[in-house]
Amino acid sequence: MSRIRLAHIVRHPVKSAGYQDIGSTTLTAGRALPFDRQWAIKTTGLPFDGPPAHWMPKLAFVRGAAEGRLQAIKAQFDEESGRIRLTHPDLPPFEGSLPSDGPALVDWIRPLWPARRPDPEALVSRTDGGALTDVPEPHVSILSLKTNRILGQRLGRDLSIYRWRGNLWLDGLDPWEEFDLIGSEITIGGARLRIEDRITRCVATTFDPETGLKDADTLGALEDGFDHQDFGVYARVIESGPIAVGDTVTVMP
């Protein structure tokens, strides 16, 4: 195994409303990546009012699998001030503070959301402080640059890492080697994580994160070439600590 390093840290402050590269952060045991899916936009017709008290499934929210144009939103979020800037190729930029400018953010995203779907209603966060990720466990997602490259070669195109909506991108793993790490523990910077499961993918990954247009049959390429629709792995933070792009990743014996 060659030297493995942390190549990218990516968070998505508002679920399905923008991706952001960051240089460093601190992982906390039993928690998701800080400010990743901290907020989500709930839709009408749901059996709860106000912010959710715990994890809720993605069907309760505005989500990229239901409208690919959302995939082209980019985010710049400052965690100290709470200021956020969102851009999309079809809309003027949005700037505001979270959560106070939630209603304005909901109005900004509304033109991208299909009229046939329940209306975007409110920006919400969990009252227990957890993340509104696609799974109830407080996982951090880990992905491999070489696996992404191999899949892109099968499709005959470069695949942006941002279509996968992952958190930690590793360079130095062989293609698909991340699956072999399930059950193992790794260290990144000052944090320790346990690799727990594969990530099964959905149609959101077929959309270009630059344009929001459907441009690659990622699911078909995975199924036809590798007999599954999995990409990346879920990990649980078991020891808190700082991480930064460029950190060495060590697989524990």
Image (cartoon, rainbow, N blue to C red):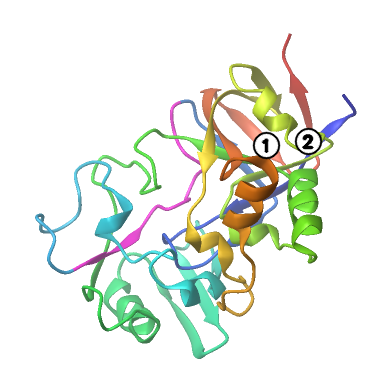
- Horizontal relation, residue 120 to residue 105: left or right: left
Give above or below for 24 relative to 44. Answer: above
- Horizontal relation, residue 64 to residue 105: left or right: right
Give above or below for 220 relative to 3. Answer: below
Judging by the rendered image, the residue that carries numbered circle 2 is 247
Say which element carries label 2: loop
Camera sees residue 143: no
Say which element carries label 1: strand
Check residue 241 for magenta coloring. no
Give above or below for 11 relative to 111. Answer: above
- Residue most extreme to the top: 253
Q: From which residue to which does the magenta span run? A: 30-43
Query: In the rendered structure, which amino acid carries the disc numbered 1?
Result: Ile
**Residue 245: x %, y % from top left:** 75, 45
In this orientation, which residue lies closer to the viewer: 176 or 242?
176
Query: In the rendered structure, which amino acid carries the disc numbered 2?
Result: Asp
- Horizontal relation, residue 195 to residue 161: left or right: left
At horizontal 78% and vertical 66% (from top left) the residue drawn is 157
Q: Return the mark for residue 243.
A: 1
In this orientation, which residue lies closer to the viewer: 67 or 55?
67
Magenta segment, prevailing SS (helix, strand or loop)? loop
The quarter of the picture where residue 130 lies is: top left
Q: Are discs 2 and 1 less than 8 Å apart at CB?
A: yes
At horizontal 40% and vertical 47% (from top left) the residue drawn is 133
The quarter of the picture where residue 21 lies is: bottom right
In this orientation, which residue lies closer to the viewer: 136 or 250?
136
Check residue 34 for magenta coloring. yes
**Residue 39: x %, y % from top left:** 36, 57
At horizontal 69% and vertical 23% (from top left) the residue drawn is 180
**Residue 25: x %, y % from top left:** 61, 43
Q: Mark 1: give few (<14), some (14-19) or many (20+) Cα within 10 Å.
A: many
**Residue 192: x %, y % from top left:** 62, 22
